[in-house]
Image (cartoon, rainbow, N blue to C red):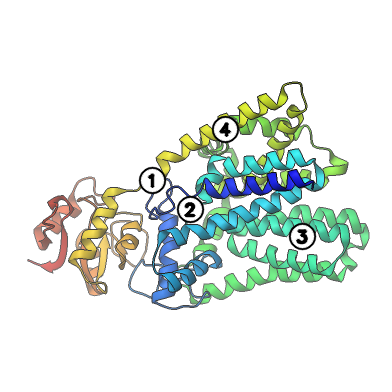
Amino acid sequence: MRFSNKWLFIILLAVIFLIRIPHIENSPYEVGESWRQADTESMARNFVEERFNIFFPQLNYDGPSPNYAQLEFQVTTFLIAILYKLFGYHYELARLIPILFFTFSACYLYLITKKYNSTEVALLTTLLYGVFPLNWFFSRAIMPESAVLFFSLGALYYFISWIEQGKAKTLIMATVMTALAILLKIPAIFIGIPMLWMSIVKYKSKIFLNWQLWLFAIFALGLPFVYFKWLETVAEFKFVTGISSKHIIPEFVTAVFTKESLQFFSTHLPQSFTWIGLILAVIGMFMLKWKSEYPIVVWVLAIVLEVITIVAVIQFNYYLILIGPVLAILAGKALGSIWKWRFGSIFVIGVLAIIIFNSYSTIQPKVIEKDNLLKQAEYVKKYTSKEDLIVIGTFSPELINASERKGWRANINYYDYIPQEPKEEIEYFISHGAKYFVPIKGYIYGDGDNAYRKYLDDHFIKVQVAEDPAYSFYLLKEK
């Protein structure tokens, strides 16, 4: 890398970092994605306040603590918890961790791209990666997505380096980072497809005799398997096993052909990567060279497979996060080719300006905080005690987290062991220690006929919020 390109890359990384600083003080309760952010942040607090052990992640719902959950390995939350212990609860610290993970992931993407393309293409790829709307928003969200990108891209970079150079230390790095990527998000396992293909190309029929590859596979796949199976034995809520067995496995072949799936992709792909970004990526696909860039080609195909089998089933927009790096590479190739044209640089700068403006405009409505929820949470904290168990009236548990309490969600009809009729359900909550029922400004999920609210009004004392009566809630004590 020439001196000028080195500093250009450093400036680019600084820009990627700095554009994520606005709204860094935001709470997790944003319009764009509050449930997942709230859960992540609350787990960090629970490490500090309940059990400072990375192997025992717990949520604030449904019920009194502990609420151990079978979720991803808590690298992000535990690092946040360490900062919380040292400096206190500050959302800036919680957001700093994913921002740093994403910034360093951009380094790995640059290095991977540079192996097969010019410096100009690598720089354009890195810039696009940093400004795509989905990447921009979720890389500063209090979620594990940035860490997944960091470990996935690091794993691929080190594996490519091992294939090229055969150094043991690069294979060790690839092993550790692959295991961590899968521990953080199981779909990251698809990064193993280009790794497998590179191994076949290099070792051919001798691939099964290579003990280093066997060790890589045993540790990279075995550690996540052992972790999730062990966590299943201690967790009250088996999210990983449940999502896999109830949703992904039954539908992973057919889901992509459903109307809901097509609607999801037609809406969220352009929102996440812009129409211009998608068009450039399609152009870039036709510019790939199989012989010299086959790891990138296979990586693209692996991500397509992940989209078809996993994203089409789950249909959460943040599950598109693994698409970002390959789309950036493909779009970067297209822009790199255009850059060579006469006046091409002017056209490329214009395109980048449009993408950046589009991304900024897409993100701004998503970083708005939910005022009603935050107000309700403040009144809960003011009028109740820290140890009080609460019941909330929303399907999302955000209010429990924002109130810094523990408790249940009412009227969601999710658990077989919780009665579904208002009277019986409330009695169940009370018998298990619930003290307050808190709707957000009176809203109760699924209560279209107001039967649930009527039962509460008729039987329980209302805690009047003097500052704003609309935020009043119920003491679960019979009148």
Q: Amino acid at mark 1?
A: Val
Which mark is drawn over residue 141? Answer: 2
Q: Amino acid at mark 4?
A: Ile
Counting residues from the N terminus, which is met first, the one under dot 2 or under dot 3?
2
Q: CA distance from mark 3 to mark 4?
A: 31 Å
Q: CA distance from mark 1 to mark 3?
A: 37 Å
Q: Residue 145: in sight, yes or no?
A: no
Q: Residue 325, position in %: x, y?
A: 66, 46
Residue linked to disc 1: 31
Helix, strand or loop status at disc 4 = helix
For the residues carrying marks 2 and 1, which lies nearer the camera in this image? 2
Residue drawn where x is 56% and y is 59% of the image: 244
Counting residues from the N terminus, which is met first, the one under dot 1 or under dot 4?
1
Q: Amino acid at mark 3?
A: Tyr
Residue linked to disc 3: 158
Q: Residue furthest left?
A: 479
Helix, strand or loop status at disc 2 = loop
Counting residues from the N terminus, which is met first, the one under dot 1 or under dot 3?
1
Q: Residue 432, position in %: x, y?
A: 26, 74
Which mark is drawn over residue 355? Answer: 4
Helix, strand or loop status at disc 3 = helix
